[in-house]
Amino acid sequence: MTNTASQTEKKILVIGSTGKTGSRVLQRLKELGVAVQSGARSSNPKFDWKDPDTWERALKNISAVYISFYPDLAAPDTTKIIKSFTETATKNGVQKLVLLSGRGEEEAQACEKIVINAGVNWTIVRASWFGQNFSEGNILEPILSGHVALPAGDIAEPFIDADDIADVAVAALTEDGHNGKIYEVTGPRLLTFKEAIEEIAKATGKSISYQTIPMKDYASELVSYGLPADLILLITYLFTEVLDGRNEKITDGVEQALGRKATDFSEFAEKAAARGVWN
């Protein structure tokens, strides 16, 4: 790890520190003994993407930032928010920005350009769908019920383990060798959602059925769950636009960054099952 002395004087801010990747990044940095600050609405100081007044206080004495945007960089007006944030960050002396981005999302790539042109060191971690969407996201409850119905048919996705994303992000935050790099990170194998559910069924020893349903039926289901309209629109976009085959390829971003292979989905499923996530 380089620049250890400067990192103990200044902190790394982890935005989205209660989320799937941010919580893992935060934990790893703490384990490394790096001075780190949580960036969430429950943090002190508070950080809220919807409240720019919270940004400056959260950025005080910060040298590097892990940027994880909720709910997704594809959400409306996100480019304006990211531009405003990066300007505030650089004005407050931040020297490095590490952005979690999404594959095949035009809006995400627009946000990448903003970070790249911010005038400080940067790394982009452009990720495929997380395996943890099955263990920590909206798909968890249907798995527990034994029946998963999604608007995803034969299109395959190289699901990535959020632990791999966190390892890449931590390397980028703590080492200078990742500056100016775009790491497109995926798992090592293409799986349809049905095949992913089959892997989980095998790991848990449970019977879990999978059904492909129309997007409108899934949207109605999300409404019944009480999800806000803007989040339903975003999920609709991800299932209909991003899952159209454009990302049906494997990349070696994890290996480029870390010198090791990405975690296979079966290994992710076995680890999650061993923790009792799907019990």
Image (cartoon, helix red, strand yellow):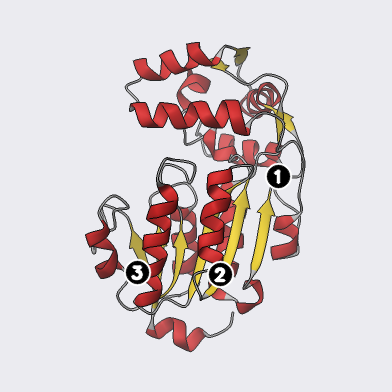
Amino acid type of the residue that numbered disc 1 sits on in the rendered structure: Gly
**Please, what secondary structure does the residue beneath circle 3 have?**
helix
For label 2, the residue is 122
As drawn, 216 above or below 139: above
| Vertical placement of residue 277 versus 5, above or below | above
Q: Residue at x 36, y 76 (%)?
A: 91
Distance Cα–Cα, label 2 vs label 1: 23 Å
Residue 122 lies, with reference to residue 233, above or below; the image says: below
Residue 88: which numbered mark, if any? Answer: 3
Q: Which residue does the image show at 47% across and 34% down from the upper left?
A: 137
Q: Residue at x 61, y 46 (%)?
A: 161
Regarding mark 1 in the picture, which secondary structure is present there? Answer: loop
Which circle marks residue 187 in the picture? 1
| Viewport quadrant of the N terminus | bottom right
The image quarter in which residue 81 lies: bottom left
- In the drawing, does residue 234 fall left or right of residue 47? right
Does residue 139 appear in the picture of this structure? no
> Of circles 3 and 2, which is in front?
3
In the picture, measured across the screen, residue 275 lies left or right of residue 243, that is: left
